[in-house]
Image (cartoon, rainbow, N blue to C red):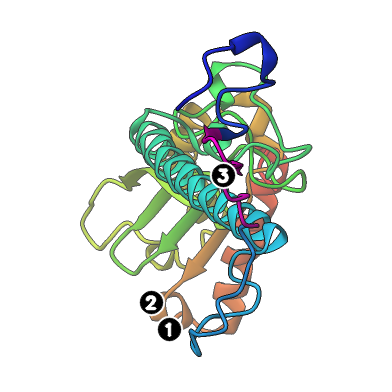
Amino acid sequence: MFSSDANSRPGIWSSLSFSSPRRRTSLSLPKTQPVNRIDSSDPYEKPDRHSPDNSASSAGLMSDLRAAWMNQGQRSRYLKTGGVIAFVVLIIYFFSPRTITDRYPGKFPGGDVASDPSVATARCKRSYSSSKPLIQYALMIDAGSTGSRIHVYRFNNCGPTPELEDEKFEMTAKKEGGSGLSSYKSDAEGAAKSLDPLMEVAMKNVPDKLKSCTPIAVKATAGLRKLGPEMSDAILKAVRTRLETVYPFP
């Protein structure tokens, strides 16, 4: 029979006592076997399968894999977000109204800046190079056989090559026998003065600040050569003298 004296035993499961007239028998519960015990009857059992160290390293590996996967996901999200932001910034940048100088800051160090509206341009605020003015003019006179013509060209130097912004054109009045330089023959001074109406167009359109640096060229055609070297040379000399002494253009 079971003993009913609870105070006389250290624990209820520590032993089981049976009483009989002849002998006492005590039974104890089997001890718990270690978790790493190897069953020799299983030929496929790995020796370190239940090892505490192996379990710990497996758990650490899984933890590292989860952390790497999370880091990769975060990097992917960051890259996608950064790409979207960069795309939006580029769209705003290229479609916003900007001049060449604003679009490429630092590319025009020391470039010329307009001192007043007469030498300014709507294309940019500063010239491409410090060696070039922001606005530049050039004059060309075409001395033909039937008349002379002037072209007043206006350029800006916002880029690496000049850009033509405007052109003024004027021609000498027609008259019987033609109004070209060759029509004056031996009257070299009259031939030179015939260009005055054309030069007034240049004086009116070229700003005063740029007159001294606006070059002028005169190109004559075959009509002047027909006069022979003596008369043609005299006319060209008179034209040069008048342009150099009366007008400020080089």
Q: Nearer the viewer, residue 185 or 16?
A: 16
Residue in the image at 28% along x and 64% along y: 146
Residue 195: give x, y in percent of width and height: 47, 47
Q: Name the residue under label 2.
A: 223
Q: Distance between the residues labelled 1 and 3?
A: 139 Å
Q: Mark 1 points at which residue?
A: 226
Q: How far apart are marks 2 and 1 (CA)?
A: 5 Å
Q: Where is residue 52 in the image (x, y as percent from the top left)?
A: 68, 57
Type of residue at label 3? Leu
| Disc assigned to residue 29 | 3
Q: Residue furthest bottom?
A: 43
Which type of secondary structure does the marked residue at label 2 adopt? helix
Tally of numbered discs = 3
Along the polypeptide, which appears first: circle 2 or circle 3? 3
Element marked by disc 3: loop
Check if mark 2's residue and mark 1's residue have beta carbons within 8 Å. yes
Q: What residue type is labelled 2?
A: Gly
The quarter holding residue 28 reads: top right
